[in-house]
Image: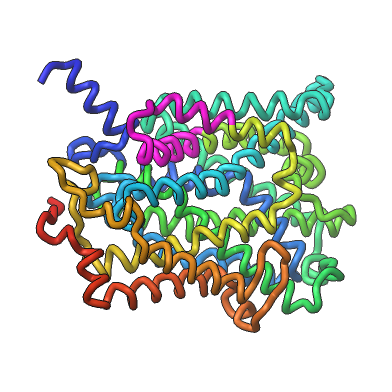
Amino acid sequence: MSSVSNKAAEQEAIFGVAPLLHEERTYSFWDFFFVVSGFGIAVWCYSQGVYIASLNHFSTMICSILGGNMLFMCLMCLVMVPIVRYGIDSWVYFRAVFGYTGVKIVCIAVVIVNFPWYAIGADIFASALISLGSSFGIDLTAVAWRPILGVLCIVLGTIVAIAGPTALKWANRVLVPTLLAVAVVIVFAAFSSLSGSDLTNFEPDLTAFESARQAYGFSLEGNIAFSMSWISCIGAMPRLCKRESHAYFGAALSYGTMVPIMCLIGGILSVAMFCRFGVLSDDPVEMYAALVHPALAILGLFFIAFSSIAVQGVGSYSFAIVLKSIFPKVGFKPLAFVLAAYVIALILWGGVAAHLGPFMSIGGIIYAPIIGLLIVDFFIVRKQRFSMRSIYRLDGNESYKYHGGFNLLSFIAFAIGVVVMIRIYNPITGSVNSGLFYFIGASAWSCVAAGLAYYIGSRLPSIQNYLLKDRSELTRAK
């Protein structure tokens, strides 16, 4: 094969949907841990922490954030097994779960629901630069400059994404330890002016809820839905790992430990703001500027800005690969530009942050059944083996065509999961319809219901044959 052909194959593996061979994988445990942590502990953790703090007393805030985020991560990280074992994005494997056409509908819905998070990151990037400018005597009017700087964040992040996994790896090796250290120092600095009683006596405004128990239920659901949202972009980066254990434990420690810690820091800082100034701020830039020494605040603002760009880079790379899995003939760069245009439109609209709670729960309607379906399909129904020939429709193999490209059982089970969630809690109206909500929210029940419905359906002989047409052409991972 010529050097040109080799280069083309390498580019298709890294920026496309071709499987990555073991010798092409470049991420060790630490590489993956730093990239995923840099992505996970981004500025949205502050927004999440503030949202949870607004619903809880200090002690229950800690329980909700740590318990809600950690609860499902060990289970969720199982979805990385087929990704690393076969070197493919999770959405490529989802062709087997939803069918060749069905996966396109689900994928587009997930991108639409999840990518608005990056508008929040871009807005905080803009706020950080405006505040930095003010520190150096440069007056940047927020009304005029916030959208401009938000767009700049998206553009720079897209450039990082196009640079590829190596650039992402080195950027996050620097970012993660530094950002975490700065956040911890700022928390201690903020605490130095507070007493323990200030925090424990914090009283959130719960007038919109029937009781503190109901508010806690909402916060727990918000945390579980937040943790489940990682399923949308969890597939692109793990396939770069050299071993399955690198991906599983790297993600479990980052999403399951680092992310909750950063959410907790965001919640603590917001409570500190309330204790000091009577305002439960949702802006990390405002927190940094008000709670600590100006020099430390400037350092924190600098790394907030840097992290926003790095996060946009990881997100753009991951979601462009996601879209390429369903539009394989479209180039990586055009898809990255489409995502950039989508977030820019959301930035100019400016309403994402104001609808954070319902926005997370609506995402949970989609994420929760998907997680249940994927785990049951791969580990129980297919027993960890599927056909790569049919995944890529090679040599006329189309075991995952099902009915017109739709796996009807998956969509029925998905619908059951959605109905169960809405019967317990309707995120559109915000109404709680069952006491089950107060145990583990609604998203968790939806995940269980969808997985259970899929499993029961798969045990019926006629449906089992429908699902397992791939048995005669199984590909064994090396």
Report how many numbered discs are placed on residues in the image: 0
Left or right, 115 with respect to 297, comes to left
Residue extending farthest to the right is 278
Residue extending farthest to the front is 404
- Magenta span has 337? yes
Q: Quadrant of residue 75?
A: bottom left
Which residue is found at the position 83% from the left and 68% from the top? 208
- Magenta span has 374? no
Q: Picture coordinates of residue 396 (x, y %)?
A: 15, 43
Magenta span = 313-341
Which residue is found at the position 61% from the left and 34% from the top? 343
Left or right, 240 with respect to 416, comes to left
Which residue is found at the position 64% from the left and 38% from the top? 119
Residue 74 in view, yes or no: no
Measured along the vertical axis of the image, is residue 55 above or below residue 14?
below
- Magenta: main secondary structure equals helix
Q: Picture coordinates of residue 373 (x, y %)?
A: 38, 65
Q: Nearer the viewer, residue 466 or 243?
A: 466
Left or right, 238 with respect to 275, comes to left
